[in-house]
Structure formats: structure tokens, C-alpha cells
Image (cartoon, grey):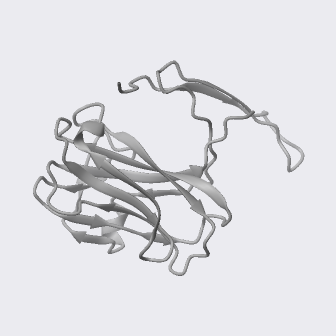
Amino acid sequence: GLDRLPPTGTLTLPAFASSPTITAQLSATDMGPSGFAGWGLSNNWRWEGEDKLAQGYVLGAGGVVSDAQALNGRALFAPLGSSIIWYGPYTFDLPIGQGYRAYFRLKTNTITTTSQLAKLDVVADGANPIGIKRIYGTDFRALNQYQEFFVDFNYVVSPTLGVEFRVDSEGALPGDLYLDRVLVATYPLTTP
């Protein structure tokens, strides 16, 4: 029942522009059983997992490791049996008043367990989630391969501390867990 086929697509932009308005052409298809979910745009709203340690946004376990599968060669890692809360970056970069999708890029060494690996959430006031998703070992398509899990959120509340993206084990991890990065894009649109 899992959709294991990635979507395909192209984005065409003009070679040059002489005005502040440009025309972009996007074409995408998804042959998997999930179908095409739409497209979203990001203004470089990306936060690396390993930066959380450097910024002091790690409670419990968490260390930076070299990882050839990570997009920049490093990831935040916690081993089996440890407890984690990874949070931050307390950003004010996202425009208020629209929907977004936060993509958490994770991997684990346990994909057969039905135990929860992490609670992913988005918070704007330091306490109350405006988007949440629970991830279980069986949600991963492949062992030791990164996969993106998304959390949708409607960002209409003015943040008091800035927006943070959290990964919380809510107890002992049933397997190793890696966080490569969090990428935020506008909520997917399906119309051209």
C-alpha cells in the first residue's frame, strides 16, 4: 500500500529577464498510486539538522555525524534507546497568513517496528503545535535511506518566539534516528 514511485517534473525559466515579472512553466506527473499532490515554492526556507546542535537546540541525545547520504554530508544523529527533543530555529522568515508544508528529511535503521520513532511538529508560540505528525518505523519505505515526511501548518498567528520545527522521541527511540534537514515550502497547489 505504500507509494514507492517518486514524482517527475520539469521547471522552465527564461534565459534572461528585463522586468521584475517572469513566466515559469512547471510540468509534473506522479505515476505512483498516491497521484500528483501539487507544487509549492520555497524562498530558501531550509534548516540543517546538524545546526540544531551548534545553536543549542538539542535536549537529550544528539550528535553531528558524517553521512554520505545527507544532502550536505552531515546529519544530526541519536542512537537506539536514547531520548531526544530537537527544536528551533525560531525563525521569523516565513510570511504570515498562508499555509505551508514542512518537510523533515529523516532516516532510521528500523522499518519493521510499529513503535513511534518521533513526533514532528511546528510551533509558533513555543508551546502549542500548529502542525503535527507522528512517525512510526513502518512509515519508512527503506532501511537506512532518507525519506521526507511532511507536516502541514497554517501560519496565521503572529509568532512570539519565531517558528520552530521539532523532532521529539517522546521516550526511548526504538531505533537509530537521523535528521538531515527541514525544508519549508508553500502549501502545494494543484492548479497551473
Q: Is residue 22 left or right of residue 43?
A: right
Q: Residue 69 is drawn in which quadrant?
A: top left
Question: x%, y% of residue 49?
Answer: 36, 58
Report whether residue 122 is seen: yes
Q: Residue 14 is drawn in which quadrant?
A: top right
Q: Residue furthest left?
A: 81
Q: Is residue 116 left or right of residue 86?
A: left
Q: Residue furthest right?
A: 19
Q: How many marks?
A: 0
Question: x%, y% of residue 182?
Answer: 44, 54
Could you tell me which residue is drawn at 14 percent across and 59 percent down? 172
Question: x%, y% of residue 95?
Answer: 66, 65
Q: Is residue 64 left or right of residue 92?
A: left
Q: Residue furthest bottom?
A: 160
Question: x%, y% of residue 120?
Answer: 37, 57
In this view, 138 is above or below 181 = above
In this view, 112 is above or below 172 = above
Quadrant where the image shows the C terminus: top right
Q: Residue 50 is drawn in which quadrant?
A: bottom left
In this view, 99 is above or below 54 = above
Quadrant where the image shows the N terminus: top left
Query: As rendered, which of 171 and 78 lies closer to the eye?
Result: 171
Q: Is residue 88 left or right of residue 25?
A: left
Could you tell me which residue is drawn at 32 percent across and 52 percent down? 179
Report whether residue 74 is seen: no
Query: As rendered, which of 43 and 139 lies closer to the eye?
Result: 139
In this view, 138 is above or below 76 = above
